[in-house]
Image (cartoon, rainbow, N blue to C red):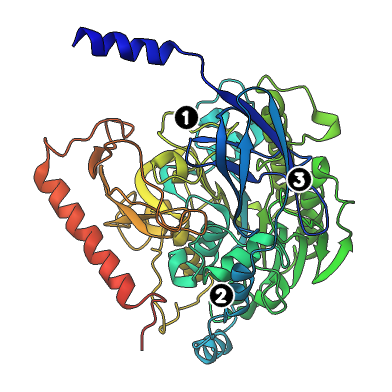
């Protein structure tokens, strides 16, 4: 045994015969390819190409070694590299296009809008809103985290306008987005349905011609909201409201799928996230500022300018102003006049500029004397991204931990919602459609499941006990695969382990080491401790509820009622 140990020690201490491999990867036209994985899979070495297409891999064992390249957009290929015992070898490779991906994308067929006739008949049957129906303003932030506002505990970022307006109404501390990322959450907000029913639960939509549009199509995912979905803007437009959107749409850019074709009589903004390109500014279905000329730091101000003008122009009638700001989504570019002033750094600058613009919206309602005739809702599309704060919650954007989906929420309607009130009842942005529809005298469509609940009993005590729960269960969808991963019932949340499948991880992305299905006590914990052993019956009941919900949705994915 002693000889074997000594022999192993001698072997391990011998100098390794290994060389360095560097090189450059180019595309079919000779342009360098950044972000290309370069691997020696047999010896566990690798690198990713930089902006100039270069890579460098140190200490590759000497001899004939197989080097592989390839990603989603370029075909996989390999080459045998003779690695020297000492020194460096330089390798140049040209990557070819992934024609299999292109063929799969070309074979994609968009879903037929089978319920378009029912939608058209429903909208045609909507009558004028009653005289006492309020104006509606929905302010929808992008990636604002649960802990990003000073009223929700932030000690570095100052948000007096948002906080002050929120204090004039009700705060919901257990309010959720319908999904942990942008597109699906917006689909839930505007349809009143879980985004999976709108075929919008798999990550986010991308601009036409974008490489990730190709990937979505190759995977069989839609890249625009189906035309047979009914949006709040269409309902209110049919009821006589002037309807305007000022900010980020993110529900598709194809003809027939832009804001003007989904019920908005006035629109101004961008069709995607502000980190996607091309990034032109659109107004009423036309490009008014070309790609490359949009100034990121002035977006919040521009959207507010347009929203204020719209409110002024329609103050004598009835209006729906939807203001989905692009901030604080990356990139964080503060307004030139508000840069370097926040204790919260650049991110704080962006939030405080948002706060200032929200104050402008409130000021115009007060100036015009229509604040008491206007229901205002302020919330966010999902939890905070990197740079933002989830406050005391676990997780962040793109995760089904509460930090990815629980968001600030304020509802203000003077004379109807008591000021300075709050509730811990759980609610979700899918509840806004049925709540507003009822105020506008609109019965919900009978041909489809509406998952949202009317918040009137919660917000102003109408139709039920004031402050009462409006949901028995809420469900959490995964960011990439669009699967129902978790369910909440009052204080308890059950979260199952899933290996999310997506075009980035076709076989599934495994969760952290030794993860298990877990039960969490949200009233006393931030999802740190699995309490299944303490409450096995509750865990079993919620697990069964989640499975039943999954089965119902698998049997009727679009939620049609025939």
Please tell me whether residue 156 is drawn above or below residue 534 in the rendered image. above
**Image height check: is 214 above or below 532?**
below
Q: Residue placed at 47% from the left, 58% from the top?
A: 502
Q: Earlier in the sequence, mark 3 or mark 2?
A: 2
Label 3: few (<14), some or many (≥20) within 10 Å?
A: many
- Categorize mark 2 by other alpha carbons within 10 Å: few (<14), some (14-19), many (20+): few
Per the model, the C-alpha gap separating discs 1 and 3 is 24 Å
Expressed as whole percent of the image width and height from the top left, the position of residue 19 reads 62, 26
Classify residue 241 as left or right of residue 522.
right
Which element is circle 1 on?
A: loop
Q: Position of residue 120 (x, y in %)?
A: 57, 89
Above or below, comparing residue 104 to residue 276 in the picture:
below
Calculate the distance from the C-alpha at mark 3 to the C-alpha at mark 2.
33 Å
The residue located at (45%, 58%) in the rendering is: 506
Residue 326 versus residue 232: which sits nearer the camera?
Answer: 326
Q: Quadrant of the N terminus?
A: top left
For disc 3, the marked residue is 300
Look at the image and tell me in which quarter the C terminus lies: bottom left
Q: How far apart, in angstroms, are the residues tagged by discs 1 and 2?
A: 41 Å
Residue 405 horizontal/vertical position (percent): 45, 46
Q: Secondary structure at mark 2?
A: loop
Task: Report the disc number at residue 130.
Answer: 2
Where does label 1 land, which residue? Answer: 391
């Amino acid at each position: 045994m002693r000889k074997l140990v000594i022999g192993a020690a001698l072997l391990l201490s011998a100098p390794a015969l290994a060389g360095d491999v560097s090189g450059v990867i180019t595309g079919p036209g000779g342009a360098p390819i950044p972000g290309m994985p370069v691997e020696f899979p047999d010896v566990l070495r690798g690198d990713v190409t930089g902006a100039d297409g270069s890579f460098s891999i140190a200490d590759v064992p000497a001899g004939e070694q197989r080097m592989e390249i390839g990603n989603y957009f370029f075909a996989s290929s390999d080459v045998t590299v003779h690695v020297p015992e000492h020194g460096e070898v330089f390798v140049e490779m040209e990557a070819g296009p992934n024609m299999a991906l292109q063929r799969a994308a070309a074979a994609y067929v968009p879903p037929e809008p089978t319920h378009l006739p029912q939608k058209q008949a429903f909208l045609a049957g909507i009558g004028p809103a009653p005289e006492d129906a309020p104006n509606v303003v929905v302010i929808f932030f992008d990636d604002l985290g649960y802990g990003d506002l000073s009223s929700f505990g932030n000690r570095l970022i100052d948000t007096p306008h948002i906080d002050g307006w929120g204090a004039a109404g009700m705060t919901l501390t257990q309010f959720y987005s319908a999904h942990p990322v942008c597109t699906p959450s917006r689909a839930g907000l505007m349809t009143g349905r879980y985004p999976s029913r709108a075929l919008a639960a798999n990550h986010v939509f991308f601009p036409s011609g974008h490489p990730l549009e190709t990937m979505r199509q190759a995977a069989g995912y839609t890249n625009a909201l189906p035309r047979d979905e009914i949006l709040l803007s269409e309902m209110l437009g049919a009821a006589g409201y002037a309807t305007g959107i000022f900010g980020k749409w993110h529900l598709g850019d194809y003809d027939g799928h832009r804001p003007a074709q989904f019920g908005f009589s006035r629109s101004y903004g961008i069709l995607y996230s502000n980190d996607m390109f091309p990034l032109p500014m659109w107004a009423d279905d036309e490009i008014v500022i070309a790609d490359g000329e949009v100034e990121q730091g002035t977006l919040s101000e521009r959207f507010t300018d347009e929203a204020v003008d719209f409110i002024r122009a329609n103050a004598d009638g009835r209006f729906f102003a939807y203001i989905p700001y692009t901030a604080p989504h990356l990139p964080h570019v503060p307004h030139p006049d508000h840069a370097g002033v926040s204790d919260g750094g650049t991110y704080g600058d962006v939030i405080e500029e948002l706060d200032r613009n929200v104050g402008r919206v409130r000021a115009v309602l007060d100036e015009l004397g229509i604040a008491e005739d206007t229901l205002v809702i302020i919330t966010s599309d999902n939890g905070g991204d990197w740079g933002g704060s989830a406050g005391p919650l676990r997780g962040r954007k793109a995760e089904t931990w509460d930090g990815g989906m629980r968001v600030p929420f304020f509802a203000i309607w003077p004379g109807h919602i008591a000021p300075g009130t709050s509730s811990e009842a759980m609610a979700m942005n899918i509840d806004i459609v049925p709540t507003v529809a009822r105020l506008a005298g609109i019965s919900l469509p009978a041909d489809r499941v509406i998952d949202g609940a009317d918040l009137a009993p919660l917000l102003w005590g109408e139709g039920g006990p004031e402050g009462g729960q409006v949901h028995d269960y809420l469900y959490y969808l995964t960011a990439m695969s669009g699967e129902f991963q978790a369910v909440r019932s009052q204080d308890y949340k059950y979260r199952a382990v899933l290996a999310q499948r997506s075009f980035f991880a076709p076989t599934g992305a495994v969760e952290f080491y030794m993860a298990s299905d877990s039960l969490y006590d949200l009233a006393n914990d931030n999802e740190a401790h699995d309490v299944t052993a303490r409450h096995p019956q509750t865990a079993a009941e919620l697990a069964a509820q989640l499975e039943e919900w999954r089965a119902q949705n698998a049997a009727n994915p679009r939620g049609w009622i025939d």
